[in-house]
Image (spheres, helix red, strand yellow):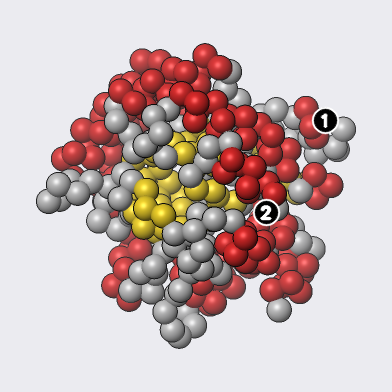
Amino acid sequence: MFGMTQRLLLKLPPEIAHEVAILGLRLFGDLPGPVRPHTAGKRTLFGCEFANPIGLAAGLDKDAKAVAGLARLGFGFVEVGTVTPRAQPGNPQPRLFRLPEHQALINRMGFNNQGVAAMVRRLDTLRAREQIAGTVIGVNLGKNKDTPLVDAAADYTTCMEQLHTLADYFTLNLSSPNTPGLRQLQHGAELSKLLNQVKEMQQRLAFGGAITPLLLKVAPDLDDEDIERIAEQLVTHELEGLIATNTTLDRALVGSHPLSEQSGGLSGGPLTAASRAVVQKFRRILPNELPVIGVGGVGSVDDAQNLLDAGADLLQIYTSFIYKGPKLVRQLTRSVS
């Protein structure tokens, strides 16, 4: 059933296919019975118990509409968002493009989402029903497009304040290329200032000594000096983890494709080597106890194992899931530990 559905979805325009898929996953999640993810490779990281090391990256379920359905497919964890304090439409369409020859996507979505209040309502309902008790839920946080960079931290802390009882962890998305100026926050004094403010909020929201872990998601387009400085900030500010990597602006591996000139972030197969290299460099620098989630170009069991061997503690997929569907989730959760 899933295979035929996948083929039909790939015949639709990308954004329509996305909406149809989210609707189908919502219905799938409403089926009776508890969600039981595959439990090969159980591990505990930053206080969360992961049934398996395979997760869904942020960007697919932006508004937490399909969490139960995604969990039912077997993911060990699902990251929803990116969510911003206020609803926003994102960038003008078309803004999502398939490059099937490369098993890749280009997107310039621009954090389109219904806002944090809508996500709170949905996650609160899911938690109350205990539908997803065995699946770790992360929330990817962003800033509204019209929020000045100097005030960006307030957008992240606003979302934290409203979601901290519902999220198992937070991801600070400072690396999307589709919000003007956002990547500047990955560097230097701007990064330090933002991390100070979000860590202060994290401590303020701690209940009974328990905090909601904070992870930082970085771009693949970093040089060695960038990586060293970001790693230093992660340790200095005592973040609980790192996600490497987001989409890339590099078109070197898809340069001949007719869609390669489309602006936005490139994801999927072309990132396999780059994301592995970034994970490996961070792993060499960071303390062993600081977890790294590897994402980017994981399209097979071999890709997954190579990224784990490079130093990732957990993995996320997105683009390969678009092309290969639930079959890939089954393969990875049953073969990778």
Of pointers 2 and 1, the one earlier in the residue sequence: 1
Residue located at (55% from left, 33% from top):
279
Say if residue 119 shows up in the picture: no
Report the residue marked by disc 1: 255
Query: In the image, what residue type sits under mark 1?
Result: Gly
Q: x%, y% of residue 122?
A: 37, 65
| Residue 301 marker | 2
Work out whether residue 217 or residue 183 is closer to the camera in this orientation and state it. Answer: 217
Q: Secondary structure at mark 1?
A: loop
Q: x%, y% of residue 143?
A: 41, 37
Query: In the image, what residue type sits under mark 2?
Result: Val
Q: x%, y% of residue 129?
A: 32, 76
Q: Secondary structure at mark 2?
A: helix
Q: State the image quarter where residue 270 is shown.
A: top right
Distance Cα–Cα, label 2 vs label 1: 27 Å
Position of residue 241 in the picture relative to residue 4 (left or right): left
Say if residue 256 shows up in the picture: yes
**Quadrant of image for the N terminus:** bottom right
Give the crowd class for mark 1: few <14, some 14-19, many >=20 residues within 10 Å: few
